[in-house]
Image: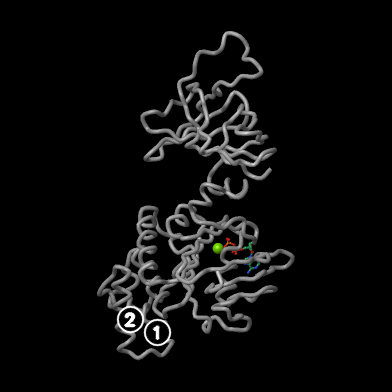
């Protein structure tokens, strides 16, 4: 991590009493793609604006290539910033938009035209120089905005909700193309989004923000498999969480005794069960006698909702005891609303979170 392209040290931005950015430490290596993920108001845009020099720090430092950026104006930082509303110049054509940065940097005309052509090729709009911006689709405008942000060859490209206004299918396609494009160009990227799917698809590393601080950082897989705490878990959409006490390879909860993976910390915790770890089978007939205190059997649950999600069905369950559970079922195996099912748990999808 010695050669971080970008480094924030205790970076702090205050609005009145409130810290929008609260002593944030973060390093981004050259060629790394980092997604900043978090709910609205968690400080994502403030982070980018501080790095770009659009908002001065109240404390701490921003370093680019090891150099403190205090007092360095935005246009001297060598960073590119692309906002959500990509703000193309409507009166200029595509070539005029993409060539704007190089023209500001007084690049010779021939070099500029070459660069514009090259970038339009890269973003999949070859030969579009003469087209009117107003006549482009949303996705095409997005690509032009991206080409424009890349044109001055920023050493760090920062994107603030770059795909926010696009419809889902286009977004999913562009995210894949962007990742390939950045890889090919070797661009270092810091991209903000509130959409975890987008962040996971784009990034080498994810930074989850909460109230101006970093709640967790890790690869998409690490964050998905081991959310640092309940906030991160719920932000990722995991809602089956309850109090537990872990002893040996089992956790005692309101849902009963759940198996936990080897190495799970012992003692009290919050226990998360991912939907894929909630296994459903047909419920046996109710026991004739009251279940014994040491009942190790399956948990009986009523199906209160089922939602078709394309490849699978999300099933919401009301257990006979304990909070609601979310299960993920194959289309063919999904029970119906009102059914009673028996639930067992796969330890691979049981995660102990700090109490
Ligand atoms: P995000 O991009 O994650 O939605 P922001 O960085 O925009 O969050 O905002 C973080 C916090 O700082 C929010 O509480 C927001 O209301 C506050 N904030 C942002 N910009 C300003 C401003 N110019 N004046 C006052 N408060 C602001
Ligand atoms: Mg924002």
Q: Which of the labelled discs sits on residue 102, or is there none?
A: 1
Q: Quadrant of the N terminus?
A: bottom right
Side of 174 relative to 282 (left or right): left
Q: Which of the two residues, 188 or 123, is positioned nearer the viewer here?
A: 188
Q: Position of residue 162 (x, y in %)?
A: 45, 64
Q: How many marks?
A: 2
Q: Are marks 2 and 1 in contact (CB under 8 Å)?
A: yes
Q: How is the image coloured?
A: one colour
Question: Which residue bears the numbered disc 2?
Answer: 115
Q: Quadrant of ligand 2?
A: bottom right
Q: Which of the two residues, 30 or 157, is positioned nearer the viewer here?
A: 30
- Above or below — where is 174 with respect to 300? below
Side of 310 relative to 265 (left or right): left
SS at mark 2 in the image: helix
Q: Position of residue 293 (x, y in %)?
A: 66, 18
Mark 2 burial class by Cα count in 10 Å: few <14, some 14-19, many 20+: many
Of pointers 2 and 1, the one earlier in the residue sequence: 1
SS at mark 1 in the image: helix
Side of 133 relative to 293 (left or right): left
Instruction: Give the Cα distance between marks 2 and 1.
Output: 9 Å
Q: Position of residue 211 (x, y in %)?
A: 65, 58
Q: Position of residue 185 (x, y in %)?
A: 37, 72
Q: Quadrant of the C terminus?
A: top right
Residue found at the far left of this picture: 127
Mark 1 burial class by Cα count in 10 Å: few <14, some 14-19, many 20+: many
């Amino acid at each position: 991590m010695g050669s971080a392209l970008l480094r924030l040290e205790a970076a702090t931005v205050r609005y009145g009493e409130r810290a929008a950015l609260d002593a944030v430490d973060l390093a981004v290596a050259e060629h790394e793609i980092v997604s900043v993920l978090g709910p609205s108001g968690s400080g994502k845009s403030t982070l980018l604006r501080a790095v770009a020099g659009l908002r001065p720090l109240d404390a701490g430092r921003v370093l680019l290539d090891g150099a403190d950026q205090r007092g360095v104006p935005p246009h001297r930082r060598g960073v590119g910033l692309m906002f959500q509303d990509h703000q193309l110049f409507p009166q200029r054509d595509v070539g005029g938009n993409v060539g704007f940065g190089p023209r500001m940097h007084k690049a010779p005309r021939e070099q500029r035209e070459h660069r514009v052509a090259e970038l339009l090729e890269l973003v999949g709009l070859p030969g579009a120089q003469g087209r009117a911006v107003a006549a482009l689709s949303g996705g095409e405008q997005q690509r032009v905005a991206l080409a424009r942000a890349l044109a001055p060859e920023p050493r760090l490209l920062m994107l603030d909700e770059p795909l926010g206004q696009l419809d889902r299918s286009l977004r999913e396609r562009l995210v894949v193309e962007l990742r390939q494009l950045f890889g090919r160009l070797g661009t270092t990227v810091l991209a903000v989004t509130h959409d975890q799917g987008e962040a996971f698809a784009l990034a080498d590393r994810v930074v989850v923000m909460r109230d101006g601080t970093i709640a967790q950082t890790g690869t998409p897989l690490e964050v998905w498999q081991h959310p640092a705490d309940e906030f991160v878990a719920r932000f990722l959409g995991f809602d089956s969480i309850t109090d537990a006490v872990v002893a040996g390879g089992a956790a005692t909860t309101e849902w009963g005794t759940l198996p936990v993976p080897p190495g799970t910390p012992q003692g009290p915790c919050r226990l998360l069960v991912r939907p894929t770890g909630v296994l459903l089978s047909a419920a046996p007939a109710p026991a004739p006698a009251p279940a014994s205190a040491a009942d190790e059997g399956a948990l009986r649950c009523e199906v209160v909702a089922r939602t078709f999600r394309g490849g699978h069905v999300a099933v919401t369950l009301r257990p006979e005891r304990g909070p609601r559970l979310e299960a993920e079922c194959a289309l063919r195996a999904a029970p119906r609303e009102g059914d009673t099912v028996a639930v067992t748990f796969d330890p691979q999808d049981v995660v102990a979170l700090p109490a």
